[in-house]
Image (cartoon, grey):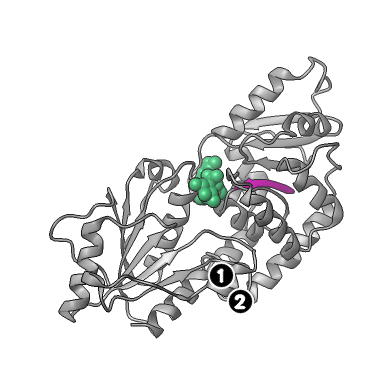
């Protein structure tokens, strides 16, 4: 498909996932020759997440657009962010004028729940009036071929295959002597103290990401008895904020990745090591069903399921030990299923081509 003009509108709720997903989408569209305007109410995180920017992506602070705004051929409204009234009006105008009719996509959150396949690519009703004749579509990312798929750069697996973890860790100033490596990107898991205590029973290196994970580890450490890591078996390295490119490499270093939210879960799947996911907690506990659906899709062995339920606070009790090989095998198999499918951008481009 010839390069199109895209407008992606993103409102940052909290954390880094909204902006992280929108950035990856924008950069991957640009890599395929499309011109992207990324409108974000709070773009400051891009300074560390994507310090070099990306050719073909223009970042615009604010989601209001000006009075003279002309919509691109595709307008993506990310995560039900609700487009500003003048953006909606401009889409209606473009449609009435019959010229550059905009294809309006509602990009939704990722889930493995069955409703995703049922709802993906359905037309989303638009109320008439100024918007009469405008069409928009629900776009649901997902893990199976009947959903919107997952973001994956064309060269990702090749870059992953050529990665040298000893070299990367040395470059970060982290001392590694061959012990198992675990990365930690989480909110405030209730079992964190217990996890640290268990990890300290055998040599391991824990790479703790900046922000909430680091704060939670420091709090847990302070609450532990002084003897909890007396032999220093568990080495803890606090990692500064990384660009998305380097964040991927952090995940490639680990023998087990603890991830959270949406984007890092997908990146941990591509990394292919064992993974433990902390779902973004929702006040109505909707994340419980989301977690179970993901574990079903993953084909998680019993110990991994139990670990997830404790890590996400669905159950209380003793964490089972990490089972390195079976957990890795489950992720490798899941990754193979995903690699046999198209990535998200390929599927999105198809949907747009069919409906323009
Ligand atoms: O930050 P998150 O918890 O984001 C969440 C989820 O997306 C959730 O679904 C959403 O509802 C909520 O925000 C509002 O986790 P996530 O999705 O993994 O996003 C983290 C992003 O931050 C990801 O793109 C990787 C990036 N990142 C870096 O680039 N460098 C870093 O050093 C770190 C720690 C993260």
Q: Residue at x 83, y 33 (%)?
A: 198
**Helix, strand or loop at disc 2?**
loop
Q: Residues within 10 Å of mark 2 (few under 14, many from 20)?
A: some
Q: In terms of secondary structure, what is the magenta stretch mainly?
A: strand
Q: Residue at x 73, y 48 (%)?
A: 256
x, y percent for residue 148: 53, 71
Q: Residue at x 58, y 49 (%)?
A: 261
Is 6 left, or right, of 97 in this rendering? Answer: right
**Helix, strand or loop at disc 1?**
loop
Q: Are marks 1 and 2 in contact (CB under 8 Å)?
A: yes
Q: Residue at x 41, y 65 (%)?
A: 106
Q: Magenta part of the protein: which range?
A: 255-260
Q: Which label was assigned to residue 91?
A: none
Please tell me whether residue 183 belongs to the stretch shown in magenta. Answer: no
Given residues 252 and 138, the one toward you in this image is 138
Which picture quadrant has residue 228? top right
Q: How many marks?
A: 2
The residue labelled by disc 2 is 145
Q: Is residue 246 visible?
A: no
Q: Is residue 239 above or below residue 314?
A: above
């Amino acid at each position: 498909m010839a390069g199109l003009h895209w407008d992606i509108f993103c409102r940052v709720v909290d954390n880094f996932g909204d902006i992280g997903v929108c950035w990856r989408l924008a950069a991957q569209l640009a890599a395929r020759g499309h011109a992207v305007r990324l409108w974000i109410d709070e773009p400051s995180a891009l300074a560390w997440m994507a310090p070099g920017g990306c050719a073909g992506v223009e970042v615009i602070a604010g989601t209001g657009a000006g009075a003279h705004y002309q919509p691109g051929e595709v307008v993506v409204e990310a995560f039900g962010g609700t487009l500003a009234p003048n953006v909606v009006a401009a889409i209606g105008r473009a449609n009435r004028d019959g010229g550059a009719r905009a294809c309006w996509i509602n990009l939704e959150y990722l889930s493995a729940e069955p409703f995703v396949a049922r709802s993906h690519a359905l037309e989303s009703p638009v109320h008439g009036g100024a918007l009469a004749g405008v069409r928009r579509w629900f776009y649901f990312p997902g893990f199976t071929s009947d959903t919107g798929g997952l973001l994956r750069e064309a060269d990702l697996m090749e870059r992953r295959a050529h990665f040298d973890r000893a070299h990367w860790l040395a470059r970060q100033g982290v001392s590694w002597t061959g012990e198992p490596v675990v990365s930690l990107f989480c909110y405030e898991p209730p079992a964190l103290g217990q996890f640290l205590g268990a990890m300290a029973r055998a040599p391991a290196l824990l790479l703790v990401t900046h922000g909430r994970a680091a704060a939670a580890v420091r709090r847990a450490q302070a609450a532990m008895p002084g003897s909890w890591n007396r032999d220093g078996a568990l080495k803890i390295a606090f990692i500064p904020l990384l660009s998305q490119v380097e964040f991927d490499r952090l995940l490639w270093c680990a023998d087990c990745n603890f991830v959270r939210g949406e984007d890092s879960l997908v990146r941990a799947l591509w990394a292919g090591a064992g993974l433990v996911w902390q779902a973004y907690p929702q006040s109505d506990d909707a994340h419980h069903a989301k977690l179970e659906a993901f574990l079903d899709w993953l084909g998680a062995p019993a110990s991994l399921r139990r670990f997830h339920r404790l890590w996400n606070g669905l159950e209380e009790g003793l964490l089972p030990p990490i089972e390195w090989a079976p957990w890795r095998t489950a992720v490798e198999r899941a990754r193979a299923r995903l690699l046999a499918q198209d990535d998200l951008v390929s599927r999105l481009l198809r949907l747009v081509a069919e409906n323009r």
